[in-house]
Image: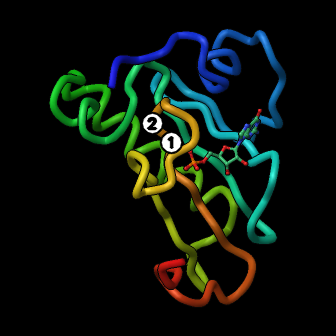
Amino acid sequence: MAYDPNNIFAKILRGDIPCKTVYEDDFALAFHDINPQAPIHVLVIPKAAYVSILDFTAEAPAEMIAGFFRAVGTVARQLGLEEPGFRMLANIGSDGGQEVPHLHIHLFGGRKLGRMVAKAD
Ligand code: 5GP
């Protein structure tokens, strides 16, 4: 899938639409999900044009990959999620349930999170 520069997270990165930022550095932006599925639900996105973990890991410079995943850990610690734990998740493609075609890691916490994968419809 080609990267769509008008996807909603690209617009957030450009500052065209607002978000509730929780963390930002040279590689990543983290902000609260607009429709939270847990008491804490934060999205971490790279500051670069990648659709998913597939093109990101194939094409991004090593510094960007390291910086992005460091930021995911930093955000989790900053949110106090280390104890009693949390979930990180990335949806990819249609079966994965990906709605926004800009790589994002979901961080969920603040309650017991239940099943790892929903039952099929
Ligand atoms: P996906 O299904 O692609 O893994 O997740 C996309 C996520 O983006 C959803 O959880 C959805 O609630 C969130 N989202 C969609 N549009 C916006 C927006 O404009 N602002 C924020 N903060 N989150 C959004």
The reply to whether discs 1 and 2 touch (Cβ–Cβ < 8 Å) is yes
Image quadrant containing the C terminus: bottom right
Q: Under 8 Å from ligand 1: the CB of mark 2?
A: no
Identified at 50% across, 42% down, the residue is 104
Q: Work out whether 77 lies above or below 110.
A: above
The picture quadrant where one finds residue 63 is top left
Q: Amino acid at mark 1?
A: His
**According to the image, label 2 marks what residue?**
103
Q: Work out whether 96 lies above or below 101.
A: below
The picture quadrant where one finds residue 66 is top left
Scheme of image coloration = rainbow
Q: Locate residue 119, reporting x and y percent.
A: 50, 84
The picture quadrant where one finds residue 82 is bottom right
Q: Work out whether 85 lies above or below 24.
A: below
Residue, far front? 121
Identified at 47% across, 29% down, the residue is 46
Mark 2 Cα within 10 Å, few/some/many (few <14, many 20+)? many
Depth check: give the residue in front, 41 or 83: 41
Q: Under 8 Å from ligand 1: the CB of mark 1?
A: yes
Q: Locate residue 112, reporting x and y percent.
A: 67, 89
Image quadrant containing the N terminus: top left
Cα–Cα gap, marks 1 and 2? 4 Å
Q: Locate residue 68, reporting x and y percent.
A: 40, 37
Question: Residue 78 bears which disc, if any?
Answer: none
Identified at 21% across, 21% down, the residue is 61
The number of discs equals 2
Identified at 51% across, 31% down, the residue is 28
Q: Amino acid at mark 2?
A: Leu
**According to the image, label 1 marks what residue?**
104
Name the element at disc 2: loop
Mark 1 Cα within 10 Å, few/some/many (few <14, many 20+)? many
Name the element at disc 1: loop
